[in-house]
Image (tube, rainbow, N blue to C red):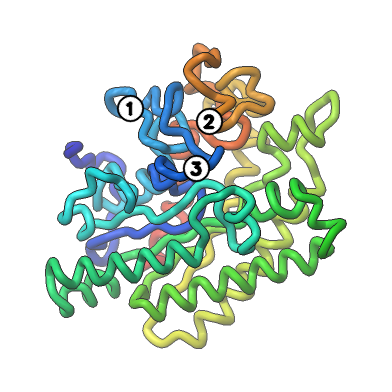
Amino acid sequence: MWARSTTWTITTKQKTPAVLFFGDSIFDTGNNNNLITEMRCNFSPYGMSFPSGVPTGRFSNGKVASDYISEFLGVQPIVPAYFDPELQPEDLLTGVSFASGGSGFDPMTPKISRVWSMLSQLTYFQEYVERVKKLVGQKKTDQLLTKGLAVVVAGSNDLVITYYGQGAQWLRYDVHYFTTMMAKSAASFVMQLYGYGAKQIAVIGTPPLGCIPSQRTLKGGLRRNCAQDINYASQLFNVKLSIALDQLAKTLPNSNVVYIDLYSPFSHIVANPQDYGFEDIKKGCCGTGLVEAGPLCNRFTPVCSNVSGYLFWDSFHPTQRFYKILVKILFEKYIHHLF
């Protein structure tokens, strides 16, 4: 077990017994490792900055957002994946990640990616609850779920993979209809989480997706500017998600449902990289940084020599250092809304 770090812990009014994570690669700590999918990264150079340089299946050079959220809450510094074969019974009591890289709120997204759907994650959450009951009994399980925090992040793959990547904007819906469907699906997911016992639920919106390297490469032209159409779609979804969650929270007794704006701080760092010590924000550290992600970023792919100066690790996912900075900003803003 890794030693617990308290350096970055933010004091809360109540002790958080467990943190549970749902969604996509931002929170995935290795659940895709045994799936037949391109959405895998349990190989070098992924994990090169992780303790002992181990590639765990985290979509970064080291720790990801779920690890830092748990660490800042003083729960545990490393969040195990629910499907980790080395998962110990006691790990269940402090929280696990059900997230699956490549997943999304649109049911089509995980089918395209061949990963665990959000519905599957809910099913495994039910299984998790039963396992915890066998360990500590009904009363302590209820306390864990009531006082614990469930955190959800999804939507990026719906826009990047399904809507724009698969041409859904031409085949099925316009962006307004699609983002409305996404927000409704997100609200439904939260309602089901609540129904299974979670009471403290935080839902994180999408970042400025047009500014990630792969989208800059695809749509930014020679100057590789941020792709404004997908940034607009991201903002549109976030507004609808915030409204849907606010309306839903009013119908769920004894609940605390919080929307977390990721777009604004992410955009601020992209616009002011020097303030945070970042030297390159337009490409990833792995390979050319323009298109490499997943299997295209492998042990034969060269990596940058100063990873701490890069905002992105590959063409889609942030570096460990960026995750740490971003999560700290979010928690300083939202921690008092969560408990």
For disc 2, the marked residue is 276
Q: CA distance from mark 1 to mark 3?
A: 21 Å
- Left or right of 91, for residue 207: right
Q: Nearer the viewer, mark 1 or mark 2?
A: 1
Rendered-image quadrant of the N terminus: top left
Q: Residue at x 79, y 41 (%)?
A: 227
> In front: 96, or 19?
96
Q: Residue at x 35, y 59 (%)?
A: 20
Q: Is residue 223 above or below residue 263?
A: above
Q: Residue furthest left?
A: 136
Q: CA distance from mark 2 to mark 3?
A: 38 Å
Q: In the rendered structure, are the residues bearing label 1 and label 3 in contact, judged by CB atoms less than 8 Å apart?
A: no
**Amino acid type of disc 1?**
Val
Q: Is residue 269 above or below residue 98?
A: above
Q: In the rendered structure, are the residues bearing label 2 and label 3 in contact, judged by CB atoms less than 8 Å apart?
A: no
Q: Residue at x 61, y 36 (%)?
A: 316
Q: Residues within 10 Å of mark 1 (few under 14, many from 20)?
A: some
**Label placed on residue 54:** 1
Q: Is residue 242 above or below residue 11?
A: below
Q: Choose the circle earlier in sequence order: 2 or 3.
A: 3
Q: Is residue 113 above or below residue 152?
A: above
Residue 305 image offset from top left, x and y in percent: 50, 12
Residue 66 image offset from top left, x and y in percent: 39, 48
